[in-house]
Image: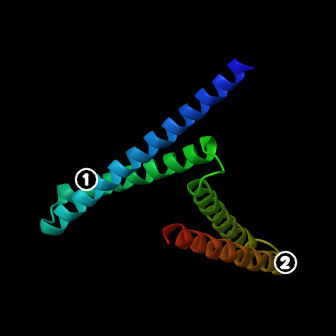
Amino acid sequence: MTRGRSQTATMAEVSSHLITSRLLVLQSKRLMLNSVQRRLDDNASARLHDQLEKLRQEAELAQHSYRSCMLNFGTADTSDYWLIAYSRLIEMGNALTLKLRETSKVLPVSERYEVSADVEMLERIVATWTQSLRMAMAEAVA
């Protein structure tokens, strides 16, 4: 029994370290991105612009990595977990809405109307999720 608890504690520690390391990488990328942005504002060179674009991509990748790590290894006990889960849900809802819109263009008119109604309903659901996320973020900041 002690061994099981020890392994659980170790796994929780490892998970926490993974999440923290991903967060630190994300924060570092954002700091570097802001630094290059300020330098670019002072001196608009092609080299800095290229560096800025590269850092933007790296920051996006770091953001995705952190969010994935939080969803895979985080606990539902933290507000960060739920903010990330909600935002991922919203992204997936928006992607589904876009796919349904694109698909409906090739459907017969009778089916297109049904899909259009589904898209409207999904958009309302996503809007509700988005509003809930904004309220949760405002509460977390307050």
Identity of the residue drawn at 69% across and 64% down: 96
**Image location of residue 94, percent across then percent down:** 64, 68
Residue 52 shown left or right of residue 73 in the figure: left
Estimate the x, y position of residue 36 in percent, counting from the top left: 22, 58
Q: Quadrant of residue 12?
A: top right
- Which badge, 2 or 1, is on the more N-terminal residue? 1
In which quadrant will I find the N terminus? top right
Residue at the limit of the structure toward the front, as seen here:
2
Residue at 17% across / 61% down in the picture? 39
In front: 28, or 1?
1
Which mark, by number, is residue 51?
Answer: 1
Which residue in the structure is indicated by mark 2?
A: 114
- Residue in front for this viewpoint, 27 or 8: 8
Q: Which mark is residue 129?
A: none
Q: Judge from the rendering whether residue 44 lies leftward or rightward of residue 87; answer left or right.
A: left
Q: Are marks 2 and 1 in contact (CB under 8 Å)?
A: no
**Residue at the right extreme of this rendering:** 110
Q: From mark 2 to mark 1, how far is it between C-alphas?
A: 47 Å
Q: Amino acid at mark 2?
A: Glu
Task: Pick the residue in front: 14 or 2.
Answer: 2
Q: Residue at x 66, y 29 (%)?
A: 8
Drawn side of residue 110 relative to residue 71, left or right: right
Give the amino acid type for the residue marked by disc 1 in the picture: Gln
Q: Is residue 7 above or below residue 72?
A: above
Which of the 4 quarters of the picture holds residue 5?
top right
**Label 1 residue SS:** helix
* Residue 116 lies in quadrant: bottom right
Tell me if mark 2 has few (under 14), some (14-19) or many (20+) residues whose alpha carbon lies within 10 angstroms of its own.
few
Of marks 2 and 1, the one in the foreground: 1
Badge 1 crowding class, 10 Å Cα cut-off, few under 14, some 14 to 19, many 20 or more, is some
